[in-house]
Amino acid sequence: MNTSVENISIEEFSKKNYQVELIEPNNKAILTHYLHNFRNGIAEHYKNGAEKVLNDFIEYKHNEEQVSIVAESAIQQLLFEVESVPFPTPENYTFNFIDLFAGVGGFRLALQNVGGKCVFTSEWEKSAQKTYRENFGEVPFGDITKNSIKNFIPQNFDILCAGFPCQAFSIAGYQKGFTDTRGTLFFDIEHIVKKHRPKVVFLENVKNLVSHDKGNTFKVIISVLEKKLGYKVYSKILNSMTHANIPQIEKEYLLLHLIQIKLKTF
């Protein structure tokens, strides 16, 4: 029997034969989150799950491919892989944050650039997950509406970022707001903020959120954040082309604007 770690990579966990064996669909997320926090205390939060993922994989390789793998060597190789990415975590980070509805990582890149470390990521769209992994070496967790996913969020972090889905409020869409299931995702953010009490929250959406349903939708959001959760809200509509020098357009006729809400506890 061969003893080898030469071909071990995160991609190995996506092989069709191995995927059939999976019980937990977020195995790659658990493992990469553990590896990304390997050099700090947050790693303990993911350790048990990551060790189970790795041990299950080693057993699979042993039984199906007759390859014997040394766990410690595999960890080192996978650690090198997740850290050798275009946008790594800054070495001397000064705060940590979580990245919800992460897309391809716009919030993460901005906060890493000012000294932040991401300790949890969630994004359900598969193509975005792949891009995120290529950029940051980390596979996002899936559907944040599930308690099983919320439970992976570390208890303590400084900042919550969430570019929650805009289609329910967008001029380009049907503007159903909170009657659209995508609109109710704001209340998942509420539950997470209530449980973890981060120091700061950044929320982003389209400019039409302010005027949607004659302003009532925005009033509900402000009321939840200030009256129910006890945060002070600051909001501003920004032209993304002006601030990012990128001509983003909502459908074919509107510049995509951002609402950036900064919250601080009293």
Image (tube, grey):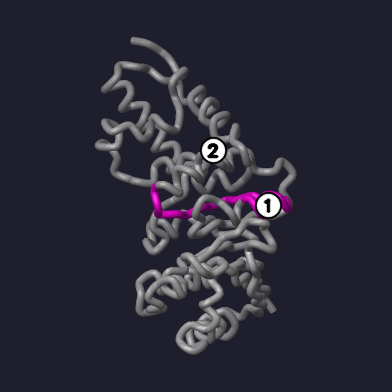
The residue indicated by pointer 1 is 116
Q: Residues within 10 Å of mark 2 (few under 14, many from 20)?
A: many
Location of residue 88 by image quarter: top right
- x, y (%) of residue 193? 54, 69
On screen, 227 above or below 249? Answer: below
Q: Nearer the viewer, residue 48 or 19?
A: 19
- x, y (%) of residue 125? 40, 53
Give the number of the mark in front: 2 or 1. Answer: 1
Task: Let me know if residue 115 is in the magenta part.
Answer: yes
- x, y (%) of residue 233? 64, 79
The residue indicated by pointer 2 is 35
Q: Amino acid at mark 1?
A: Gly
Mark 2 to mark 1 CA distance (whole Å): 17 Å
Location of residue 168 by image quarter: bottom left
Helix, strand or loop at mark 2: helix
What number is the disc on residue 172? none
Helix, strand or loop at mark 1: strand
What is the magenta range?
Answer: 109-126
Q: Amino acid at mark 2?
A: Leu
In this image, 54 relative to 107: left or right? left
Q: Residue at x 73, y 53 (%)?
A: 114
Using the rendered image of the protein, determine whether residue 48 is visible from the camera's viewpoint.
Answer: no
